[in-house]
Image (cartoon, rainbow, N blue to C red):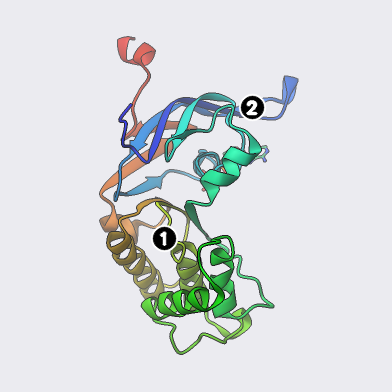
Amino acid sequence: MSSDAVVSIRNLDHFYGHDSLQKQVLFDVGFDLNPGEIVLLTGPSGCGKTTLLTLIGGLRSVQAGTLSVLGQELHGASQRQRVEVRRNIGYIFQAHNLLRFLTASQNVQMTLDLQADLNWDERIARSHQMLEAVGLGDHLDYYPENLSGGQKQRVAIARALVGRPKLVLADEPTAALDRQSGRDVVDLMQQLAKEQGCTILLVTHDNRILDIADRILEMEDGRLVKGGLTSPVLQKA
Ligand SMILES: Nc1ncnc2c1ncn2[C@@H]1O[C@H](COP(=O)(O)OP(=O)(O)OP(=O)(O)O)[C@@H](O)[C@H]1O
């Protein structure tokens, strides 16, 4: 295991259901994510990508194997430890999940409400700065219903990055976007990630954005078939 890896996973299995209805969806997954890397995770529908992403994001309990995120082992971690790890992660999902009764600026500020070291004015200034960085400086007070799909996704990116997370997890961020908006969104993620030095793990089916990756992991039927580390047992076999 690399000691400075942002994410380090070994022999990770995952199951849904119980007893006779139990179904294994991840098998012996292993890989590391290094600081500042952009890694794409691809694979057919249902192969386990979202499950893996939610495990890394501390949104699901680890059942078997080891999964360390930003130095915290999540297998056996308490709820409090998982919450602590989540504070250092930015999440971007396909459905942008903006709160419709808050403006673009307020949606972005929400992330900063958890940061006790920033006062009110600093939170507003940082949110505006980040919305300007994603090209929405003139849409600060717009509500989500008055923004296009691409603009909403850019607000979601601003919200994910405004807290300067060390890790960003993105699940199909371009799926609902047309070609140009999709391109703009990933270019922006790449640029901001490089500026802030954060690591990005991005789940995608979108072949048009493969070029932003430093590395590509490929998954099939719950196993990493490309780019992963196999367990010592399998390597010997
Ligand atoms: N909460 C759940 N309970 C039971 N089975 C689930 C649950 N969530 C996902 N699954 C099953 O686990 C498998 C992996 O699902 P997952 O959503 O991780 O795949 P995916 O690769 O992200 O798929 P897609 O690309 O379609 O989003 C699928 O067979 C799915 O039906």
Q: Residue at x 65, y 77 (%)?
A: 102
Q: Which residue position holds label 2?
A: 23
Above or below, 14 against 196 in this view is: above
The foreground one among 118 and 52 is 118
Q: CA distance from mark 2 to mark 1?
A: 37 Å
Q: Is residue 96 visible?
A: no
Q: Position of residue 158 (x, y in %)?
A: 46, 70
Label 2 C-beta lies within 8 Å of the nearest ligand 1 atom:
yes
Q: Residue at x 46, y 44 (%)?
A: 44
Describe the element under mark 2 as helix, strand or loop: strand
Asked whether, in this view, residue 18 is left or right of residue 207, the answer is right
Mark 1 belongs to which amino acid? Arg
Q: Residue at x 58, y 38 (%)?
A: 81
Q: Residues within 10 Å of mark 1 (few under 14, many from 20)?
A: some
Asked whether, in this view, residue 116 is left or right of residue 154, the answer is right
Q: Position of residue 200 (x, y in %)?
A: 37, 52
Report the quarter where the C terminus lies. Answer: top left
Between disc 2 and disc 1, whose residue precedes?
Answer: 2
Q: Which residue position holds label 1?
A: 164
Q: Position of residue 132 (x, y in %)?
A: 40, 81
